[in-house]
């Protein structure tokens, strides 16, 4: 890898560190190519990405970035999982770590907040952006359906009373 390629890689990593809602750092020693492809596919489905980069170049890219605190985690065979959604990458990494014991989560960063192993696990249990939007829409829609039900209820009650009176009139 020549100097120009290294500079380009450092720029790409810098953009990743700046624009990501969460970055998870893990060791991947011993994972097969198929397992890494599975991780990449899961992350892509969740809206995130996986990147393997030289630790030295990643540390250079971290300088001055909000998540610079993860620099100390970059030792050994590390892989970076990241997403704009502050929860997606952590959820996928946690799920993948449960299935693959060789994938060891070291920690990560959520903006300027450094996360240890327990912090990544806690973030993974939070609702994602899509889940939050769905619950907000549900809260907004619930009163409207209650109002519609309340408005429609008297009309149905009147209709049932009228049909009962009509039945009684026919019987007499």
Image (tube, rainbow, N blue to C red):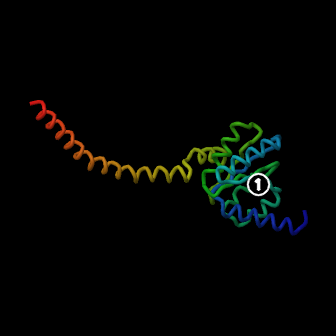
Identify the image quadrant of the N terminus: bottom right
Q: Residue at x 12, y 30 (%)?
A: 171
Q: Residue at x 66, y 55 (%)?
A: 83
Dot 1: few (<14), some (14–19), or many (≥20) neighbours within 10 Å?
some
Q: Which residue is identified by label 1?
A: 51
> In the current view of this chain or complex, which residue is farthest to the right?
2
Q: Position of residue 113 (x, y in %)?
A: 62, 56
Asked whether, in this view, residue 114 is left or right of residue 26, the answer is left
> In the current view of this chain or complex, which residue is farthest to the top?
171
Number of disc labels: 1
Image quadrant assignment for residue 48: bottom right
Asked whether, in this view, residue 76 is left or right of residue 63, the answer is right
Identify the image quadrant of the C terminus: top left
Q: Residue at x 81, y 61 (%)?
A: 57
Q: Position of residue 101 (x, y in %)?
A: 74, 36
Decide: is 35 above or below 80: above
Q: Position of residue 73 (x, y in %)?
A: 74, 51
Closer to the camera in the image, 151 or 124? 151
Q: Position of residue 100 (x, y in %)?
A: 74, 37
């Amino acid at each position: 890898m020549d100097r120009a390629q290294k500079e380009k890689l450092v720029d790409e990593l810098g953009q990743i560190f700046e624009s990501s809602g969460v970055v998870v750092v893990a060791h991947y020693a011993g994972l097969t190519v198929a397992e890494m492809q599975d991780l990449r596919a899961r992350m892509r489905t969740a809206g995130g990405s996986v990147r393997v980069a030289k630790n030295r170049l990643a540390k250079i890219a971290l300088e001055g970035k909000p998540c610079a605190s993860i620099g100390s985690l970059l030792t050994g065979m590390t892989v970076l999982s990241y997403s704009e959604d502050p929860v997606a990458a952590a959820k996928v990494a946690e799920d993948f770590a449960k299935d693959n014991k060789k994938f060891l989560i070291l920690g990560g960063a959520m903006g300027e907040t450094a996360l240890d192993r327990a912090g990544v696990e806690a973030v993974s249990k939070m609702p994602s952006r899509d889940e939050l939007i769905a619950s907000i829409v549900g809260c907004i829609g619930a009163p409207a359906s209650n109002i519609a039900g309340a408005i429609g209820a008297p009309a149905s009650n009147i209709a049932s009373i009228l049909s009962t009176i009509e039945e009684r009139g026919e019987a007499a």
